[in-house]
Image: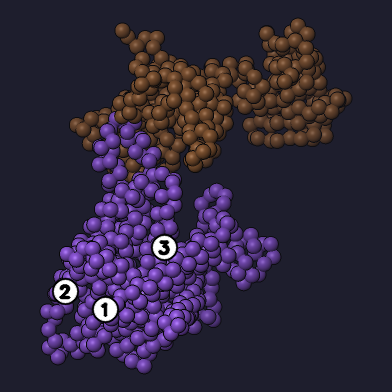
Amino acid sequence: MTAEGVPAVRVRGLLKAFVGARRRTAATQVLHGVDLDVAPGSLLAVLGPSGCGKTTLLRVIAGFERADGGVVEIAGRVVSGPGTHLPPEQRRVGVVPQEQALFPHLSVAGNVGYGLPTAERRGGSRVAQMLELAGLAELGDRMPHELSGGQQQRVALARALAPGPSVVLLDEPFGGLDAALRMTIRGHVRAMLHASGATAILVTHDQEEALSIADRVAVMRDGAVIQEGAPVDVYSRPVDLGVATFVGDANLLAGTVRDRSVTTALGSLTARAGSPQGAVTVVVRPEQVRVRAAADGAAEVIGRLYFGHDAILTLRLPDGTTVDARVARSATLEPGERADVSCAERVVCFPLE
Amino acid sequence: MLLRQRTAALLARSVLLAVTVTAAAVVLGVTLAWLTVRSRLPAAGAWGVAAALPLAIPTYVAGLAYISRFPGLAGFPGAWLVLTLYSYPYVFLPVAAALRRVDPATEEVSRSLGSSGWETFSRITLRQVRPAVAAGGLLVALYVFSDFGAVSLMRYDAFTRVIYQSYQSSFDRTPAAVLGCLLVAVTVVIVVAEGRTRGRAGYARSGQGAARRAPTADLGGWRWPALAFVSAVTALTLGVPGVTLAVWVARGVSEGAPLAGTAAAALGSLTVSVLGAIVTTLAAVPVALLAARHRTPLARGVERASYAGHALPGLVIALSLVFFATRYAGALYQRVPLLVFAYFVLFLPLAVGAVHASALQAPPVLEDVARSLGRSPLAVLRTITAPLTAPGIAAGAALVFLTCLKELPATLLLRPTGLPTLSVRVWEETGAGEYAAAAPAAALLVVVAAIPTWLLTRRTGTLS
């Protein structure tokens, strides 16, 4: 039987609770039946606010924590299930923790070679190959503390990839890096993962990071996966209001749907297929709002955040509602100027709670 | 009734000594810490090392130096002087570390809110190092109550001296036991008080970003008086014993006094101290590793245990072991195993503290990663945990070794007859007025003990 069609990682109904640190405090249910499939060679981002259980999910998949229920399969093999709990060293799972956790007493090459068979550990071709992949070919003899944050990140990933694991787990891998570095490193990590053909699960609370780097995004909330899909689907077709506001900026407007037409303060908009009828909350992304300067426009610019590449304008509509609009740098207006606003794209509607 | 009055007087004498020494040590320790860390004192780093070194000199060695040179100091003045000069590092070291950690931004904010330099120092800087001052001061108080060397050589009737005399002079050992219990009660009160002083204010740095190094103050015209002050302190703490011991050693050598006694004592010290260090460290490793991994009451206990070690005076431990051995295990009395066991009881907290600190060098996440890379738990222990913690464990063992080497009261009571040690030799010969015979052993102790103290302060200096 080939691995064709078998997910690299398959998670079904995963449960995990932590007993309180003090006796008598109730156990906290952290994972409430997580389901997840990761296709071989793909990068899945698990996106969720802090405390949603995403790090625990990684630790259970890696085997550091024992699941209370449910099944974890890696490359078709059950590693965690009723009566089964393979120790971490038998799972063929690479781990890149948040703090990278390079072995401080080993050189870069020593770190990368740590998971290899004894013969290949020192100066083997695999170590050289991985250092090459990480763009660190010259730095094998350095000690971890002699590296920059970005280099440490790449060493940690090279170390995880070296033994050719079935899946690599990355826990908030860019959390400790400053914004400027983050973009570059994100690119490096994605390139390294693709070049090695590895399957990876990346956990993050940063929606921009998840959408930009991943092939698939799983949104987690309160210990369960709420929505799983391609980044563009999660962003443009969120399953509920929570996901909609979590994965990106959103204007939430009151509206009334009849057939596909929604009446809102922005005028009459077109709802996506399958919208509920009647009173709804309408999600309008700032980049969906069109702004056209007009001296007699109905809306007034009351605020502006200028980002260089573009800007966010805050506009007050005739009925007092305010909306944010993302506009090109060339189209930016000054506060106090008037404009016409509209939205031509299809919008997502959710029934009122 | 008479006994009660005498006990009250004894308690008063001990408390008087503890209070006056603690007050003086706090003033001395804080002043030196500020001068060496936050002022532009010439060669501040070197003075910082010199200020920590008195820790390496046991009080009975210092007592030997002072009583042999200034016999008029005997009694309270001598005990007060020696204890102050050799215990203030317990205040100096934590306060210096705390001063280094003070975020200069908090001081700048205070200045920008309109406070003067002095106001900022008293309202912001001093407040932030207050826990360190309190903890150090209480350590000094504990040290004074449990010290045996200085008070016995200076012939000041504090608890330990009276307990020892009452133990030596009568067959009825009950009074010694009663006084010992009283002494422990006093030290326990101090330890509890230490816990209370910590209060609830947070002293950790809040906010992110690396703290800058604290700026140093220009001393201006005070530069030379400050230099004179630190020189005087160093002359008293290091100069007096150094010169005195050198003079006595030279005199002994020129008079042809045999060094064989010192050599035999060194061998004896080496034997019992190595055994004590091995046994204590081996016992400390599992306790400390467990405590470092799990945030349990045990872990919190371990953190407090370093104080417990100070709270149980060596003399009391030794006495209780003597009682135990003479009643129930006569075969052990004045045998090496019992002495090693005393070291184990006395210094386990010390070893646990050192190993605990080194265990934090190997956080569990490293082991998680190593396991996920396919290595078995045993291989991970061998390739990750052991290499990372071994230096700390070795340092802990060395620390215990040195502490055993300097230990006096337990060694005095429990050592096998015919097994001399350096500390006992210094104490006995000094007591008999044979300073030239005591000096070589004392000099050897100081030299051996000074090296790691110097290394330790240098390391902590560069780390922070």
| Residue shown at 56% from the left, 67% from the top | B126
> Label 3 belongs to which residue?
B307
Chain label for disc 1: B
What separation in Å lies between label 3 and label 1 (alpha carbons)? 33 Å
| Residue shown at 54% from the left, 63% from the top | B197
Q: Quadrant of residue B338?
A: bottom left
Q: Do dots 2 and 1 share one subunit? A: yes
| Residue shown at 34% from the left, 11% from the top | A3
> Label 2 belongs to which residue?
B417
The reply to whether discs 2 and 1 touch (Cβ–Cβ < 8 Å) is: no
| Residue shown at 50% from the left, 61% from the top | B195
Q: Quadrant of residue B13?
A: bottom left
Q: Earlier in the sequence, mark 3 or mark 1?
A: 1
Amino acid type for the residue under numbered disc 1:
Phe
Image side of residue B131 versus residue A82, left or right: right
Q: Quadrant of the C terminus of chain B?
A: bottom left
Local packing at callout 1 (Cα closer than 10 Å; few below 14, some 14-19, many 20+) is: few
Q: Where B75 falls versus B138 (above or below)?
A: below
Q: Earlier in the sequence, mark 2 or mark 3?
A: 3
> Label 1 belongs to which residue?
B171
- Counting from the top left corner in percent of width and height, residue B99 is at 50, 64
Nearest the eye: B38 or B361: B361
Amino acid type for the residue under numbered disc 3:
Tyr
What separation in Å lies between label 2 and label 1 (alpha carbons)? 19 Å
Chain label for disc 2: B
Chain depicted in purple:
B
Q: Earlier in the sequence, mark 2 or mark 1?
A: 1
SS at mark 1 in the image: loop
Colour of chain A as rendered:
brown
Q: In the image, which is nearer the foreground, mark 2 or mark 1? A: 1
